[in-house]
Amino acid sequence: MYSFSTRSYFIATPASTYVNNALAYGRTVVSYLCCFACEFPLDFSEKVEHSVVDVLKRCRQQLYTGSGQWRQNAQIILAFSWEKLNTGTWRDVDKEWRCLYSYGCLFKVAALCRDDASSATVQEAIRTCDLGLLMGAAIMDNILQSFVRILQNDIGKRHSNEENPSEGVSAQKMKVDCVSVPVVKQALAVPRIHCPSLESFKKDYLDPQKPVILEGIIDHWPAFKNHPWSIEYLQTVAGCRTVPVEVGSRYTDEEWSQTLLTVNEFIDRYIVVKDASSLGYLAQHQLFDQVPELKDDICIPDYCCLGEGDEDDITINAWFGPGGTVSPPCIKILNRTSWLRWLGESTFVCIPLRTPRNSTLTNYSSYTTLVRWRWKVQTWCDSQSL
């Protein structure tokens, strides 16, 4: 059982000749930087100590001159900012510390790529970019994302030259689990409708806040037409990207933990050949922001326009994991929530928000549905709770 829920800066001056020539594999990672070191933005408030800003300026100067121990200086920035990121709760972390961490990642990637980089070094550079995208903040027009595209292209070309066309990810087979399927009482089953009009959806389900399964509304997605999604496709597009993985059946368990893995590592360990001792789950992660190539394969359903706010306010998260993973009861306070399943089976229990706290699940007047899909996407839209 599987589920998958979906001003450039250019160097063109002699001052950058050293950097351009240093990249032996022909890709100028730092070609997205400013023409001169004096134009490289390092704007921080007094919250960031002057000594730290001095290290940043030293890294910046070394980036353009090619002298000094700039990778060591980058590590100093990363260590200092990492401590700030992990002090207190995440919502209280000042954006300047996240920006500082991103700059540290930027300088480290530039240092890794200054010499003849091996595949392992390029992979480390991609991982560093991903850490900056996950933990840092967007800097210089999201330059770390541009770095990833360049580096990932290099990795893809190396793999195409090294691998046997008859081998590779296409030969991998997913392990299909045999799991018990709950019986859904017809009276409590979530209704299914095919491509309703916006008017009828709003009148019959959104306004009265009733859950519903919408079928056939995203069959036009590029994920089905242009290049159908598969495990192999995900590995090709995002295999070398680092993502957060939850380890354990549910996050309320004492042994539950989190780790960072590449998508390839996650698939090999938990999807293709499932680790019997633990479950791994990529859950509620903004994968589509991290990997824009996947976001290009999907579209926001028109029904979402009926909610409050603008399209830019919509958060798109991804869930990807094996059978046996459980999301404990939680309240969805957003007025528009949709779940899009690409492959697999899921059971949803929808509980009215006004249910007394001392009630048990067995006493709830709720909707239940078993959602079973394979190579077909259907949508469940809930305007109140899940």
Image (cartoon, helix red, strand yellow):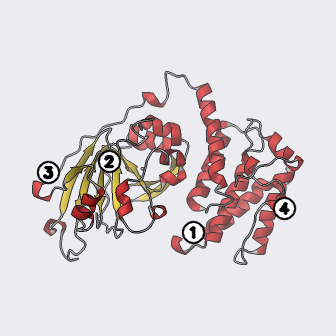
| Mark 3 lies on residue | 183
Q: Residue at x 74, y 52 (%)?
A: 9
Q: Are marks 4 and 3 in contact (CB under 8 Å)?
A: no
Q: Amino acid at mark 2?
A: Ile
Q: Is 187 above or below relative to 52?
A: above
Real-space Cα separation, disc 4 to disc 2, in angstroms: 51 Å
Q: Quadrant of the C terminus?
A: bottom left
Residue lying at 34% horizontally and 42% vertically, measured from the top left: 219
Q: In which quarter of the view is residue 201 placed?
A: bottom left
Q: What is the three-letter code of the residue carrying label 4?
A: Cys
Q: Earlier in the sequence, mark 4 or mark 1?
A: 4
Query: Residue 86 — which label?
Result: 1
Whole-number angstrom distance, CA of label 2 to CA of label 3: 26 Å
Q: Which numbered marker is on residue 217?
A: 2
Q: Position of residue 342 (x, y in %)?
A: 35, 44
Q: Residue at x 62, y 51 (%)?
A: 145
Distance from Cα at disc 4 to Cα at disc 1? 32 Å
Q: Which mark is residue 345?
A: none
Q: At numbered mark 4, what does the secondary structure look like: helix, strand or loop?
A: helix
